[in-house]
Image: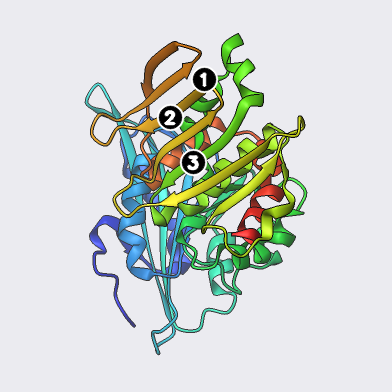
Amino acid sequence: MTIPSDCSILGKEVPVSDIEIELKKLWEADDASTHASLMNFAVYSEDASALACNSSMVREITREHACRAILVGIDLDDPEVGMRSWITAHCNLANGKKAVCCEQIAFHLAGKVVGRYRNSIFAHLQSDLPLVFWWQGELTDRFDDRLYTLIARLIIDSAEWAEPRAQYRLLERALLQDGLVVQDLSWTRTYRVRLAIASLFDDHAGQAALPKIEKVNIVVHPDNLQSGLQLLAWMSTQCEWAFANDMLTSDRAPHSFSFQSKGGKFIEAQIVTDENSLAINEVTLSGDDFEAKVSLGENDNLIHLVFDIQGIHVEESTPAESIEPQDLVRDQLSRGGKNSLFKKVFPRYIELMDRS
C-alpha cells in the first residue's frame, strides 16, 4: 500500500476502529480551554498525496471556523486495497496558551474503494452538525446521490476541470437537491471584482452610463476562463441583456459574444485569456462617451477603479482578496448564504459555455 509522502502533519496514526476512542484520549490529555465544532468539514481528493497540503489548509480555515475536519485521500491506482487513518487537533492560541481546538481525522484509502470512502466519512460525522464538503478536482462516479443528499454545502472549483460543461452535467441532479448550496470557487474569485464594478455604477453618472455600454472586455488567465464567463454571465443577467441573433456566426473570435440591451443597443463582449495575466486581470466597460475599468495590481494587492464620463475622471482603489484556495473557502464560509445570485446567473453561464 502506497504511503503518503508526509504523514507527520497528519498527527497520530490510529486504527480506523479506534478513532473515536483515540480522539477522546487526545482531548483528555490536552490543555485546550475549548473543544469547538460548528460543522463537519470534509475535504475529498482522489490525489492521495494532497492529504498533507489539505491538512495545512484546514489549519488555516479553522482559525476562523470551528469544525470537525475529515480529510479523505484516495489512491485508486494502488493494486493493494487498504486504509490508514490519523488524528490531530488544530489549536488557536490566546495569551500564549491553547484556547480553541478543532479535531481532524485523515484517511488514506488505496485500491478499489467502492463505498469505503463514504463509510469513512459518514461514520465519523458529528450527527447534529451540517456537512460542508469540499470536492477537489474532477467529479467522478463516486459523486452520487448517496453522498450529496447528506451535504449542506458543496464546494467545487470549475477552474480544475478539463471539461466544465460536462462536469456541471454531473452536478445537475445535485443542484436540484433541496437545501444543498453549491459554491464554485471560480465564482468566489470574482467577488471583489463584482463589488468594484457595481460600485462604479452606484451614483447618478454611473447609472446614466449603464444603458450606453457597447463593449465589454474581460482579461483573465487561461486557467480562470470560468471566472471570466461567470463575470460576464453576472453582468449580462443583471443588465437584462439578451443574446443577439448573430451570436452563432462562425467567424467570431473565441469567447466573444453579442448581446442586445432592453433599449435595443448592441453590446459586443469578449473574454481574452493571457498567460501573463493574473487570475482576473482587468474588466473594461465602454460606450459612446465613457469608459469604466477595474484592474488588479500585480504587487499591491489592490483593485483599481477608473471611471471617465463626459470629462469627469474618477480613480480609487479598494483591497483585493487572496485567491488561495483555503482563503476562498474561509471567506465563503464567513459569508454563508444560499448563493442565490449564482443560481440566478447560472443558466446564462451555462449558455455562455455552450456558445464559447
Dots 1, 2 in contact, CB < 8 A = yes
Residue labelled with disc 2: 294
Which is nearer the eye, 101 or 257? Answer: 257
Of circles 2 and 3, the one toward us is 3
Q: Amino acid at mark 1?
A: Leu
State how many labels appear: 3
What x and y, as percent, mark residue 1? 34, 83
Q: Is residue 203 visible?
A: no
Which is nearer the eye, 188 or 257? Answer: 257
The answer to which of marks 1 and 2 sits earlier in the sequence is 1
Q: Amino acid at mark 2?
A: Val
Of circles 3 and 1, the one toward us is 3
- The crowd level at tag 2 (other Cα within 10 Å; few <14, some 14-19, many 20+) is many
What x and y, as percent, mark residue 348? 69, 48
Residue labelled with disc 1: 200
Q: Is residue 312 left or right of residue 139?
A: left
In the rendered image, the quadrant that contains the C terminus is bottom right
What's the mark number on residue 217? 3
Q: Amino acid at mark 3?
A: Asn
Q: Quadrant of residue 242?
A: top right
Is label 2 in a helix, a strand or a loop?
strand
Residue at 35% x, 63% y is 50
Residue at 56% x, 52% y is 256
- Residue 111 lies, with reference to residue 28, above or below; the image says below
